Amino acid sequence: MHTRVTGVVIEDGQILLLDQDTDGARSWSLPGGKVENGETLAEALVREMREETGVDVEIGRLLYVCDHTRAHVAHITFEARRIGGEVGAVTEGADTRPIRQVAFVPLDDLPELGFSEKFAKLCREGFPGAGSYMGPKSAIGL
């Protein structure tokens, strides 16, 4: 099983997302990626956020752990806070799938971008139950 970390950065009712091809129907997704050998979860997320969004972050609460059993991946998502960097200053070539755009998107626009209303509600409510094992990704609306 592989481990993937993602970060949720919410500022002023907007969430940091990136637009790139994914394995699913959505093109917008949370920034993050695979944890490399020798990295802690926090180190991997700080690196991935910098590479994919240009933003430097400080890792906060563990929001949830989910399984994606078809792909044999454990998804671990943290709250993160922007502490520097420049939104959109993507590290070219760091990701195998080109990133078309990085943006702070209003939470109310999440359903229009292919996110479930359940996920949008979790974001608006500050992730009640944070730190929980949630089972399949569908349990959090992803």
Image (spheres, grey):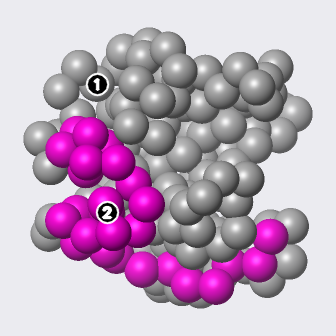
| Residue 113 numbered tag | none
120 on left or right of 89:
left
The quadrant the N terminus occupies is: top right
Residue 117 belongs to magenta span: yes
Of residue 76 and residue 82, the one placed in the foreground of this image is 76
Q: Residue at x 35, y 20 (%)?
A: 131
Residue flagged by tag 2: what amino acid is it?
Answer: Leu
Within the image, what quadrant is residue 130 found in? top left
Tell me if residue 116 comes above or below residue 10 in the rendering.
above
Q: Residues within 10 Å of mark 1 (few under 14, many from 20)?
A: some
Percent across and percent down for residue 87 are: 47, 82
Percent across and percent down for residue 124 are: 15, 49
Residue 135 belongs to magenta span: no
Q: Which badge, 1 or 2, comes first in the chain's sequence? A: 2
Q: Residue at x 26, y 70 (%)?
A: 109
In the picture of the structure, the residue carrying the numbered disc 1 is 130
Within the image, what quadrant is residue 26 found in? bottom right
- The stretch in magenta equals 97-123
Q: Is residue 114 visible?
A: yes
Q: Residue at x 23, y 20 (%)?
A: 129
82 on left or right of 72:
left
Percent across and percent down for residue 28 are: 52, 67
Residue flagged by tag 1: what amino acid is it?
Answer: Ala
Mark 1 to mark 2: distance in Å?
Answer: 20 Å
Tell me if residue 2 comes above or below residue 142 in the rendering.
above
| Residue 110 numbered tag | 2
Tell me if residue 129 comes above or below residue 103 in the rendering.
above
Contact? badges 1 and 2 (CB < 8 Å): no
SS for dot 1: loop
- Mark 1 vs mark 2: in front: 2
35 on left or right of 84:
right
The number of callouts visible is 2
